[in-house]
Image (tube, grey):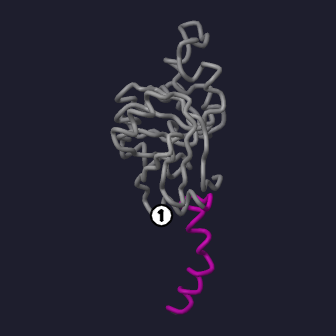
Amino acid sequence: MQALKTLRSRTVVLPSTNIDTDQIIPARFLTTTTRDGLGASLFADWRYDGAGRPRADFALNQPAARGCEILVAGRNFGCGSSREHAPWALLDFGIRAVISTEIADIFRNNSLKNGLVPVIVDGATHEWLLGNPLAEVALDLETCTLALPTGITVKFPLDAFARYCLLNGVDELGFLMSKEAETRAWEQRRG
């Protein structure tokens, strides 16, 4: 996992509410146990027509969205079944953070374990972001703040352990492995 302290990016906006994990990555693409290539299937039923051609009107297919690393979504993003492939697909596509007023708990936990930053903001900030697609914003994980181009900075909640892992580019297993010497020393002291 790549360490992430700050992220400055333009935003791509999907204002729909209740975007579930099957819309993020349809079940037919869950046959893999690796992350590689899942970005091509991200929002597949929305991004492509029945013949597999990209839909020009879908936000992620528009040329201006290329390089955007922050997705602003409607309320209740990531609801539905637990699907680690959903954050994998977003990350493989190039999305590093999702901003909404509400992100489903299971999706948020899966995201944090895989290096995708779920950012919960207040209604006014969310409305501004929805109304200003492609705005360049800055996330600071050290201070847990989101800076808008208007000069407004808002705080967002982030679990301390998840924040530590994101800042240091380590997942839960990597964190535990980094404590191996300390664990062995403790075990030896305990006899």
Residue 94, position as x, y percentages in the image? 63, 36
Regarding residue 78, the answer to whether it shows in the image is yes
Q: Quadrant of residue 81?
A: top left
Kind of residue at disc 1: Phe
Asked if the magenta segment contains residue 171, the reply would be yes
Q: Residue at x 56, y 61 (%)?
A: 173
- Is residue 27 something that shows in the picture? no
Q: Nearer the viewer, residue 81 or 96?
A: 96
Secondary structure under the numbered disc 1 in the rendered image: helix
Main SS type for the magenta part? helix
The answer to whether 140 appears left or right of 20 in the picture is: right
Q: Residue at x 65, y 27 (%)?
A: 66
Q: Is 32 drawn above or below residue 183 in the view shown?
A: above
Magenta-drawn segment: 168-190
Residue 184 position in % (x across, y down) = 59, 82
Residue 34 left/right relative to 155: right
Q: Residue at x 54, y 92 (%)?
A: 189
Residue 87 belongs to magenta span? no
Quick one: which residue is furthest to the front in this view?
Answer: 151
Residue at (38, 33) in percent of width and height: 127
* Among the 4 quarters of the image, the one containing residue 78: top left
Q: Badge 1: few (under 14), some or many (20 or more) residues near its Cα, within 10 Å? A: few
- Which one is in front, 145 or 43? 145
Which residue carries the number 1 mark?
161
Q: Position of residue 75 (x, y in %)?
A: 35, 34
| Position of 23 relative to 158 (above/below) | above
Q: Position of residue 48 (x, y in %)?
A: 56, 14
